[in-house]
Amino acid sequence: METLLPLAKKVGEKLKARKETVAISESSAGGLIAATLLAVPGASAYFMGAAVVYTKPAGEAFLGATPDRRKGIRSSSEPWAALAAELVRDRLKTTWGLAETGASGPTGNGYGDPAGHTCVAVVGPDGKKIARTLRTGSNDRVENMRAFAAEALKLLDEQLSG
């Protein structure tokens, strides 16, 4: 987490300065995105909540991602990351929604994605969705979790700067 703190601090300062809030849905990062943002003093000014959405039942319970809403969208994909970001934002009534979904390793997932694959997405105040994919090429679970959290925070930082 130490390596993620400077980026989390930067994101937190931007959110506080703008008087904006964020909600997070993450899966293969396992709560590391939320933990890193919460490690920054003053996080209560911008951090409204997070869920580790590791399964379809969790997505339905925490995000309201019913089978109808997920129809044609598979986990560990940019469309799912974008939908999860939108749903968590709507659920917690925040300015920003941030989502991550992937395969941290040491093996890939049931969809054919290799270990080290993640998709991250941000939905902002205008409802615009931005998603992208990262593939680390590594099967190191812990390192991938750090890389996934960093990628999600970078994407949020980019949107806050834009």
Image (cartoon, helix red, strand yellow):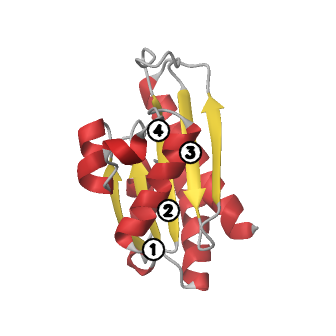
Q: Is residue 39 visible?
A: no
Give x and y (percent) for residue 154. Answer: 64, 53
Q: Are marks 2 and 4 in contact (CB under 8 Å)?
A: no
Q: Which residue is mark 3?
A: 120
Question: Where on the picture, by quarter, is residue 42?
Answer: bottom left
For marks 3 and 1, the one nearer the N-term is 1
Q: Is residue 93 above or below residue 25?
A: below
Amino acid bearing label 3: Val
Q: Which residue is mark 2?
A: 97
Residues marked 1 and 2 touching at CB (< 8 Å): yes
Instruction: Say which residue label 1 marks.
Output: 94
Residue that badge 4 annotates = 101
Q: Is residue 74 above or below residue 79?
A: above
Three-letter amino acid code at the position of disc 2: Gly
Is any part of residue 12 visible from this angle? yes
Is disc 1 surrounded by few (<14), some (14 to 19) or many (20+) residues within 10 Å?
many
Identify which residue is drawn at 65% across, 53% down: 130
Q: CA distance from mark 3 to mark 2?
A: 11 Å
Going by the numbered disc 4, the residue's amino acid type is Thr
Tell me the SS state at disc 3: strand
**Mark 2 to mark 4 CA distance (whole Å):** 14 Å
Q: Image point 61% across, 67% down: which residue?
A: 10
Label 4, label 1: how far apart the Cα atoms are: 20 Å
- Left-right relation of 25 to 155: left
Disc 3 to disc 1: CB gap under 8 Å: no
